[in-house]
């Protein structure tokens, strides 16, 4: 099928039932399920370009991708057609025609992630897949102060997951804040890009600060060390959400 359209798709998914974004033989992945739906709708499977990958158990409220297609099905028809055959844990939020040169990954200006922590006395069975439960009373002002030290351009080697192959470990963080709402704590971070497990490793470190095991001022030393062993543990995936991508 000749290509004459570039379509931007924004979707949400519950990451609980997927082995991450990237297609893997024999495993259920977001990309794999989406490609199957696209094949049924368009008659062939276009190449999907996503803003980035999400790990096993990580959720998305606003993942963005683009596909080059030759179909004349209007954008709204694609939205309705895909949603009619996709499983309940994926939903297409919008479909729009964009310029042929639009690239969901390379043209992204920033991404926004939120990590959710539940501090209620007992864990809720309804939140176990969508928030991390922490029994320890947390020092929220200390966590918020530490989060602020992340803003700006830094070398985030200390917060990078093992096995990463990147040209540079420097990233620009635009916003980094901790918000408390009742028994829920949210870490909100916006940046030009993120290293593998970077947000979850930051959260693991902020939780140590909230428990009094580290000081907010330890963040500078952790960043300067460029050593993963100096930062906190990797927070589990279920509390992490890709909220949106800005272009």
Image (tube, grey):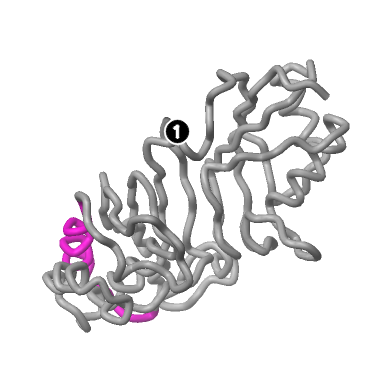
- What residue lies at 77% left-to-right and 34% top-to-bottom? 82
Q: Residues within 10 Å of mark 1 (few under 14, many from 20)?
A: few
Q: Quadrant of residue 217?
A: bottom left
Residue 39 to residue 2: above or below:
below
Residue 139 in magenta stretch? yes
Residue furthest left as drawn:
217
- What residue lies at 33% left-to-right and 46% top-to-bottom? 191
The answer to whether 236 appears left or right of 31 in the picture is: left
Q: Secondary structure at mark 1?
A: loop
The answer to whether 208 appears left or right of 1 in the picture is: left
Residue 5 in magenta stretch? no
Q: Quadrant of the C terminus?
A: top left
Q: Quadrant of the N terminus?
A: top right
Measured as percent of width and height from the top left, residue 150 is found at 22, 57
Q: Nearer the viewer, residue 88 or 175?
A: 175
Residue tagged 1: 107
The boundaries of the magenta stretch are 135-151
Residue furthest front as drawn:
167
- What residue lies at 72% left-to-right and 28% top-to-bottom? 79
Measured as percent of width and height from the top left, residue 219 is found at 18, 69
Measured as percent of width and height from the top left, residue 143 is found at 22, 66
Q: Nearer the viewer, residue 1 or 51?
A: 1
Measured as percent of width and height from the top left, residue 171 is found at 30, 52
């Amino acid at each position: 099928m000749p290509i004459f359209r570039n379509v931007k798709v924004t979707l949400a998914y519950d990451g609980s039932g997927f082995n991450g974004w990237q297609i893997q033989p024999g495993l259920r992945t977001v990309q794999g399920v989406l490609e199957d739906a696209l094949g049924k709708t368009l008659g062939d499977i276009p190449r999907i370009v996503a803003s980035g990958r999400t790990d096993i158990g990580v959720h998305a409220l606003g993942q963005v991708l683009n596909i080059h297609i030759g179909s004349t099905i209007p954008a709204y028809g694609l939205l309705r057609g895909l949603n009619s055959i996709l499983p309940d844990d994926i939903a297409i939020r919008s479909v729009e025609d964009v310029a042929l040169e639009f690239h969901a990954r390379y043209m992204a200006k920033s991404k926004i992630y939120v990590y959710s922590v539940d501090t209620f006395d007992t864990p809720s069975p309804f939140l176990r897949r969508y928030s991390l439960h922490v029994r320890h009373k947390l020092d929220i002002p200390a966590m918020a102060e530490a989060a602020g030290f992340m803003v700006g351009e830094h070398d985030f080697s200390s917060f990078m997951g093992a096995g990463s192959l990147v040209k540079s470990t420097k990233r620009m963080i635009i916003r980094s804040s901790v918000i408390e709402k009742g028994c829920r704590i949210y870490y909100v971070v916006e940046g030009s890009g993120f290293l593998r497990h970077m947000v979850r490793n930051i959260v693991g470190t902020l939780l140590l600060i909230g428990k009094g095991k580290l000081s907010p001022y330890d963040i500078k030393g952790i960043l300067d060390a460029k050593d993963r062993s100096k930062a906190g543990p990797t927070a589990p995936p279920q509390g992490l959400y890709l909220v949106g991508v800005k272009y």
